Image (spheres, coloured by chain):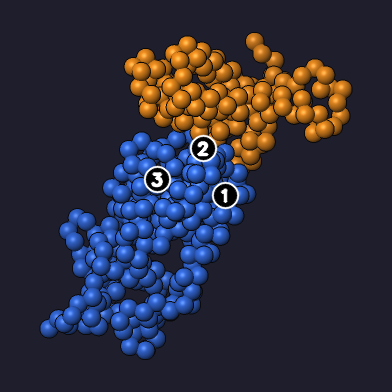
Amino acid sequence: MTLNTLNPAVIGIVEDDAVHATLIEATLISAGYAFLTFKSAEEFRRRNGFQSVDLLLLDWRMPGESGVSLVRSLREQESHSLPVIFVTSNGEEAHAVEALDAGGDDFLTKPVRRGELLARIRTALRRSQSQHSGYECFGPYRLHAHHRTIEINGELVKALPKEFDLMLFLFRRAGRLVSRESILTHVWRTNSNVQTRTIDTYVSRLRHNFGLDGRHGWIVEGVYLQGYFLREIEHQPK
Amino acid sequence: MKRARDSIPRQPEHKAQVTDHAACPVCAAHTQEDQLLQASRLDEILALEAYRPNLRAQMLAVFDACARDSLQDCRQAYRCGDQAALVHAAHRLMGSAASLGAERLRRLAAETETCAQAQADNLALADLLERLAATLDDTLCAYRHWLVLER
């Protein structure tokens, strides 16, 4: 995955056509986006793609599971508002209607022009980010994505940038197992094949410095060889 | 051996006498339908190479491999009488061609997909597959010439 500092969003490309995928990747690089490419819906699921990306460019027709089936399944998941832009070789109205009814946010026909693609991505991200423009509250925790502040029981707590990013990432996926790969990709914007204990260190800091060890009703638990799991607990640990 | 200039879509001879191509529907039709490679698409790929070095060569390699695989899948599906597989392979070829701006190939692949869906007779499909193969070769040749031109 290309590391970038211009656009923090990670774009997912689900596309079995390598020609189109190569062109889309080059377009995203030109605009400073990071991206992850998946050759099929199955690969997207297997690699927990929905945890790692901020927007999905989804091919309509693929071998195995179709793009429409994937997005329908995504929308059925609780709190799943990942922006999805369908891309297809066939510009028929019926396809557009089916894609949008299934839960897609937008629809483009190949060949996709650079300017149009980037404009649609910006629009979809803007719409998605506006949903998170205010405070996000999780029990005693209150996070503000734009101001990048954390309050615990009404008290402002200082956080390093990556501590904030990791905490926000985990809270937005609370109750779900989050893989190390998706954390590295989304929070550290780095090649997920890089082996690092940095995640473990930061998780430890979240527990110690921000009370995510259960003392405020939330706990980050490690799942061996799989990742982490942030959940709300009923009773505080002794 | 094609001249390097042939990598740019050939225009009908009378077109040289027409100054306003947009005003001539015949010229416009020929320009759109007979184009091996769309100049606008090639320009876009060239511009993107500033952000991804060797993109044009990479696109050629990927397209060559993908398109030949798709064509082979089309042939195999045709031989086996597998309509669904033929539709899928033709659709995939259409998408690859569209991404590269290979308009003539895209059009033929779309026609193949439509014919396969309509369960057209074998002769028509066989003819389309032959034309697809020839057009693919022409397209690759044209792209390689463009690469040389723009070096």
Task: Name which of mark 2 and mark 1 comes first in the sequence.
Answer: 2
Q: Which residue is mark 1?
A: A117
Q: Is residue A170 above or below residue A32?
A: below
Q: Chain of mark 2?
A: A
- Dot 3 falls on a residue whose secondary structure is helix
Answer whether residue A24 is visible to the viewer in this image. Answer: no
Seen at 84% across and 22% down, the residue is: B16
Q: Image check: A111 left or right of A56?
A: right
Are callouts 2 and 1 both on one chain?
Answer: yes
Residues tagged 2 and 3 counted as in contact (Cβ below 8 A):
no
What's the distance in space between the residues labelled 2 and 3, CA to CA?
13 Å
Q: Nearer the viewer, mark 1 or mark 3?
A: 3
What's the distance in space between the residues labelled 1 and 3, CA to CA?
18 Å
- Dot 1 falls on a residue whose secondary structure is helix
Task: Name which of mark 2 and mark 3 comes first in the sequence.
Answer: 3
Seen at 52% across and 59% down, the residue is: A124
Q: Residues within 10 Å of mark 3 (few under 14, many from 20)?
A: many
| Residue A90 image point, x, y percent | 52, 38
Q: Which residue is mark 3?
A: A67
| Residue B132 image point, x, y percent | 52, 18
Q: Which residue is mark 2?
A: A89
Are callouts 1 and 3 both on one chain?
Answer: yes
Q: Chain of mark 3?
A: A
Q: Image check: A206 left or right of B96?
A: left
Q: Which chain is orange?
A: B
The quarter of the picture where residue A232 lies is bottom left
